[in-house]
């Protein structure tokens, strides 16, 4: 709602899905432990195709919600990995 255009809807759980993906990928990169990297690679293999959702190529899809979900997941991973 903050960055979206006028008369656009940003609704649904896809932002959370992108947030989880961003979290797993960033955590694997930052931790550099075997299990974290493996989980990041599995997530990328299984759900890597949804990355196209952050591009504004389809009408009616909240690509900003997807993009900020992905960024938010990465920021959350950065904050949580540093605090451990």
Image: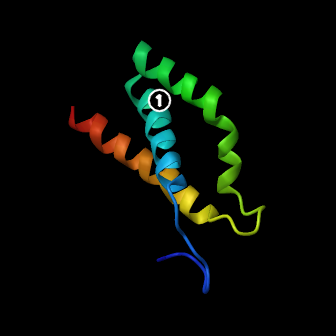
**Which residue appears at 49% of the width and 42% of the height?**
22
Residue bearing the label numbered 1: 29
Give SS at disc 1: helix
Q: Residues within 10 Å of mark 1 (few under 14, many from 20)?
A: some
Give coordinates of residue 62: x percent, y percent: 62, 65
The residue furthest bottom is 6
Q: Is residue 8 above or below residue 75?
A: below
In-front residue for pair 82/47? 47
82 sits left or right of 11 in the view: left
Give coordinates of residue 73: x percent, y percent: 43, 47
Give coordinates of residue 52: x percent, y percent: 71, 49
**Which residue appears at 78% of the width and 61% of the height?**
57
**Which residue appears at 51% of the width and 59% of the height?**
68
**Which residue appears at 66% of the width and 44% of the height?**
50
66 sits left or right of 71 in the view: right
The residue furthest front is 12
Which quarter of the figure has residue 28? top left
Which quarter of the figure has residue 65? bottom right
22 sits left or right of 9 in the view: left
The residue furthest top is 34
Q: Is residue 68 above or below residue 33?
A: below
Give coordinates of residue 29: x percent, y percent: 47, 29
Q: Is residue 35 above or below residue 68?
A: above
Where is the C terminus found, in terms of image quarters? Answer: top left
Q: How many marks?
A: 1
Scheme of colours in the image: rainbow
């Amino acid at each position: 709602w903050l960055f979206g255009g006028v008369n656009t809807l940003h609704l649904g759980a896809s932002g959370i899905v992108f947030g989880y993906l961003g979290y797993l990928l960033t955590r694997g990169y930052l931790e550099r432990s075997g299990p974290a990297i493996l989980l990041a690679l599995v997530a990328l293999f299984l759900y890597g195709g949804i990355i196209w959702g952050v591009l504004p190529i389809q009408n009616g899809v909240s690509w900003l919600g997807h993009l900020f979900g992905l960024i938010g997941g990465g920021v959350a991973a950065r904050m949580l990995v540093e605090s451990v």
